[in-house]
Amino acid sequence: MLNYLNELHQRLSLPVRYALTFAAFLLALFIRLLILPIDGGFSTVTFYPMMVVCFFLFGFGPGLLMTLMSAVTVHYIFIPPYREFGFTKNGNISLVAFLISAALIGYVILQMQAYARKAKSLADSSKKAEAFYKGVLEEQTEYIFRFLPDGSITYINESFCRFFGKHREDFIGKQWMSIVFPEDLPSVKSELSKLSSDNLIVDIENRVFASNGDLHWCRFIARGFFDVNKNLVEIQSVGRDITTRKNQEDRMRELAFHDGLTQLPNGRMLQDRLNQTLSNKKRSNHFGALMFIDLDNFKPLNDMHGHQAGDLLLIAVGRRLKGCVREGDTVARNGGDEFVVLINKLEGDEKASIAQAGIIAEKVRLTLASPYQISIEQGQKTIEHDCTASIGVAVFSGKARNTEIILSLADLAMYKAKDAGRNQVKFSATVI
């Protein structure tokens, strides 16, 4: 209501405002004559309020007109000598005081109205800016949400709702922690704790459950907002789905450490596993064993039935090898038709460890020697193929200085098995 009255002089036309001013003047005169006699003093008692009303409601011009009409009327009717323009000292003082106070009142009212208009303009601009800002946020494909330092969510955009499959009401006022995969929550909190007035932004990657219940990787850029006292007021987080990128990274990592055909560890991972085993052996008295395995009858299959049959045989060999060892042991493809088996831990002393390694190697040899049923040509044709293996074994302890020596000894033992007629197990003469 106050704002409406404050803007009334902008809504009414100029003639209407002057007419209303004249009506206000007549009302002030009528009330003054009604409540007190002409010589009863308080000559301006009704004119002051009307003057304020005219300045406030009708603007500067009507307010000035009201002031002049009031001054002339008061001087002519209510100041001695009555009903004539006499100039006495008291009358002049009263007239000047009225005019000065009227001018001050008018100036104050005009300044207040100007300030009110400016404040309203700023408020309107702020609302427009806020509406524009929210409109921009709503149009973004990123998942945007804001939350307080205590974790309460204050805003989410439409993309956020679609991704998580819920309505705004399901999130506003709730804790943001509920959207984070529990195992990732400690790391997310740790990153957010790094926000400060000197470090406004943190970059976080964590897992969340999407609307379909699938686990997705998301990257969130969180920005902290701080007050003049450097206290954290609010945090805005902008996220996007990076599941595809993460899967690609995992795939690249898989390719870097695994054989693309058999999915077994490759030579690079074998080196890492062997280094770890040697490191562990230095702290224990247990022995380990490394088996070099070379297929004896692989090339004829490739030559006769093509690479598809050869690839299927290699996959089958890898599967059989994994079934011969424990979960903690390593089966790796070393390239071509060569495989390596790392037995992480053998029980007993050197002699007992060699015997145990022999039992495992013989099990591997017999398993690989069983005929293979290989389906080619999209399952239209099945080949039965016999493929034995030559196996070289090197038993080692924590005294081994490096992996190259162990690999070389196992490789030499494997060639001894080849030279001895294939489909055999040979041990390195040296235990290191």
Image: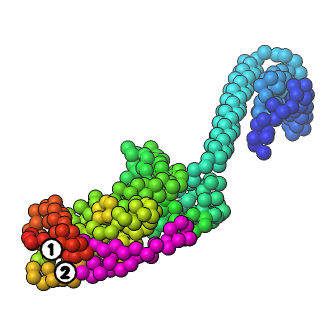
Q: Give the residue type that dot 2 points to.
A: Gly
- Pick whichever, 305 or 429, lies toward us: 305
Position in image of residue 62 (x %, y %): 82, 25
Report the side of 229 relative to 115 (left or right): left
Q: Is residue 234 visible?
A: no
Magenta stretch bounds? 362-390
Question: In the image, which disc is placed on residue 358?
Answer: 2
Q: Is residue 61 left or right of residue 194?
A: right
> From the image, which quarter does the C terminus lie in?
bottom left
Q: Is residue 412 visible?
A: yes
Q: Reply above or below: 52 against 196.
A: above
Identify the residue at horizontal 27%, vertical 67% (top origin): 294
Q: Secondary structure at mark 1?
A: strand
Give the residue at x 69% y 30%.
Answer: 114
Q: Is residue 131 left or right of residue 345?
A: right
Q: Earlier in the sequence, mark 2 or mark 1?
A: 2
Color scheme of the displayed model: rainbow
Between 336 and 108, the residue placed more toward the observer is 336
- The residue under label 1 is 427
Callout 1, which amino acid?
Phe
Q: Residue at x 43, y 50 (%)?
A: 203
Q: Residues within 10 Å of mark 2 (few under 14, many from 20)?
A: some
Disc 2 to disc 1: CB gap under 8 Å: yes
Packing grade of label 1 (10 A; few <14, some 14-19, many >=20) is: many
For residue 324: magenta?
A: no
Question: In the image, is residue 168 above or below residue 111?
Answer: below
Is 387 in the magenta? yes
Q: Secondary structure at mark 2?
A: helix
Q: Position of residue 180 (x, y in %)?
A: 49, 64
Q: CA distance from mark 2 to mark 1?
A: 8 Å
